[in-house]
Image (cartoon, rainbow, N blue to C red):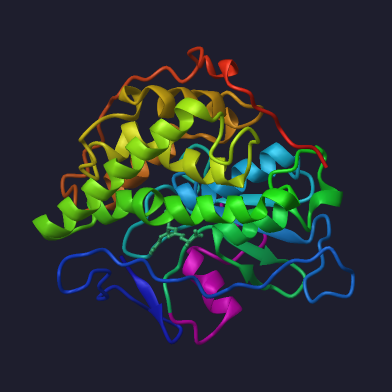
Amino acid sequence: MGKMIEGTWRTDTWIRDNEGHFEREPTTFRNPIEDDDSAQFPAESGRYHLYVSYACPWAHRTLIARALMGLEDAIDVSVVHPYMLEDGWSFDTDFHGATGDGVHDDTEFLRQLYRRADHNYSGRVTVPVLWDTETDRIVNNESREIIRMFSTAFGELADSDIDLAPPELRGDIDDAIDAIYQPVNNGVYRAGFATTQSAYEESVEELFEALEHWNDHLAENRYLCGDVLTEADICMFTTLIRFDPVYYGHFKCNLGHIYEFEHLWNYTLELYQLGEVAGTCHFDHIQQHYYYSHESINPTRVVPRGPVIDYDKPHGRDRLQGRIARR
Ligand SMILES: N[C@@H](CCC(=O)N[C@@H](CS)C(=O)NCC(=O)O)C(=O)O
């Protein structure tokens, strides 16, 4: 995997520490968009552009928040090609759903946008990216901050009145997102990219302990933060929906499938079937990306045909009290 060092693309970098633990770098573009005309980045319809991969769980969070809130007309999207190879994410369009760069004519790779935003950029070239078409720069590339901006600053521009971060729940939502980040969302990557047995086992045990914990929680609670659907559920869902198709096999997270956890499974089905969520799930991009891009884990690049999973099955979650907050 490549990264930028002082504006130059390098492929000789390492993403693990000396004990074989995968280390995810913090993101660097962290500007807020505000519901305030005098802000540096005010919320405006048509001004900001979202770059995503359909394969990526972090980018998928932003697509779900955008879809549930009805921000499709306000924020346009470009989708990268699922193969992330020597040059990183590309704007090739020879894969169903890969759109190319909808803002610039001259970009082949996402790294060119990072360089355009900062000539001296050092760091990973990741999706999602929220781009300001007015100043031609990156506003923010941290998924949880982007979904919070969609939930708050963009509220007035949304077609739906769904509130994914009701003010009185924000502390709980942040705690839940923090709690699932390391063991679950990043945990699957820590297991999959570990290069020593001990680093792998540590991650996989922590992951399954967390899955047991949340399965128990969901036996009694409709959602992560009680009876209200929030951003935290979006953050959990994008890992769960990829789990059986890729993390179980490709990342060796195989102490159990999600469909074997009664409550996590039905919760996954419920979220998949909610509103526009199913339309944001692209299993072809997901499977092709992981199995084809990570040559160090799957050198043959053979992509499995299965599993065959029916996400439209009844979920039975209505037995628990649940609601969607409205602004
Ligand atoms: N913390 C970031 C993580 C984003 C991230 O790591 N995206 C992955 C795709 S799943 C990526 O673009 N990786 C490319 C790389 O690290 O070179 C967020 O939540 O937005």
Q: Is 1 rendered above or below residue 281?
A: below
Extreme-right residue of the structure:
37
Foreground: 150 or 4? 150
Range shown magenta: 99-122
Query: Residue 145: image x %, image y %?
Result: 61, 61
Residue 288 highlighted magenta (yes or no)? no
Foreground: 202 or 149? 202
Residue 100 highlighted magenta (yes or no)? yes
Residue 263 location, quadrant: top left
* Residue at left offset 58%, top offset 77%: 116
Q: Is 326 rendered above or below residue 2?
A: above
Secondary structure mostly seen in magenta is loop
Query: Residue 239: image x %, image y %?
Result: 42, 42
Query: Residue 223: image x %, image y %?
Result: 56, 34
Which corner quadrant of the figure contains ligand 1? bottom left
Q: Total number of numbered labels?
A: 0
Query: Residue 222: image x %, image y %?
Result: 56, 29
* Residue at left offset 27%, top offset 56%: 190
* Residue at left offset 79%, top offset 76%: 40
Q: Is residue 80 visible?
A: no
Drawn side of residue 269 relative to residue 199, left or right? right
Drawn side of residue 159 relative to residue 267, left or right? right
* Residue at left offset 50%, top offset 64%: 110
Quarter of the C terminus within the rendering: top right
Extreme-front residue of the structure:
220
Q: Is residue 194 visible?
A: yes
